[in-house]
Image: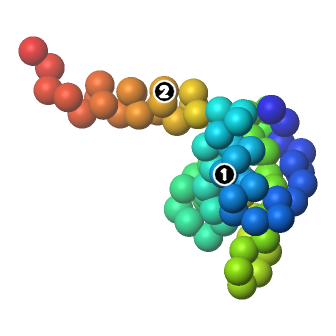
C-alpha cells in the first residue's frame, strides 16, 4: 500500500466495501486515531493511503491501513497489559 492519495469514495458504504474487500481498517480525519496514524504514515508511508469520502454533510478524509497492523498493535497491547505469571 502506498501513501499516495487513493482517490474519492462516493459515500461511506463504498469506503466500507473497499476496506472489507482489501483487508483494511480506516480512521476519520479529526479523530485522535487519525492524528496518530498520520504521524506513523510520515515514518512508514508504504503502509497508509489517504482518501476522501463523500458524507451527508461534506467531503472528509480517511486514512486506510492494513488490518494486520491493527491486529498486531492489539496483540502487543494485550500482552503488555496482561499480568505476568
Q: Are marks 1 and 2 in contact (CB under 8 Å)?
A: no
Task: Give residue 41's quadrant in the image.
Answer: top right
Nearer to us in this view, 55 or 39: 55
The residue that mark 1 highlights is 16
Label 1: few (<14), some or many (≥20) within 10 Å?
some
Residue 66 visible here: no
Nearer to us in this view, 73 or 8: 8
Q: Residue at x 58, y 34 (%)?
A: 67
Q: Residue at x 24, y 33 (%)?
A: 81
Residue 48 visible here: yes
Q: Residue at x 62, y 70 (%)?
A: 30
Name the image quarter holding the C terminus: top left
Q: CA distance from mark 1 to mark 2?
A: 21 Å
In this rendering, position of residue 6 left or right of residue 53: right
Percent x, y of residue 55: 72, 74
Name the image quarter holding the N terminus: top right
- Which residue appears farthest toward the left when viewing the image? 85
Instruction: Find residue 34 and name its label.
Output: none
Amino acid at each position: 500500500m502506498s501513501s499516495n492519495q487513493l482517490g474519492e469514495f462516493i459515500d461511506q458504504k463504498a469506503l466500507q466495501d473497499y476496506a472489507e474487500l482489501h483487508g483494511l481498517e480506516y480512521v476519520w480525519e479529526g479523530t485522535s486515531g487519525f492524528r496518530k496514524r498520520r504521524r506513523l504514515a510520515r515514518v512508514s508511508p508504504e503502509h497508509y493511503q489517504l482518501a476522501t469520502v463523500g458524507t451527508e454533510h461534506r467531503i472528509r478524509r480517511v486514512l486506510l491501513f492494513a488490518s494486520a497492523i491493527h491486529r498486531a498493535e492489539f496483540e502487543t497491547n494485550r500482552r503488555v497489559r496482561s499480568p505476568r505469571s
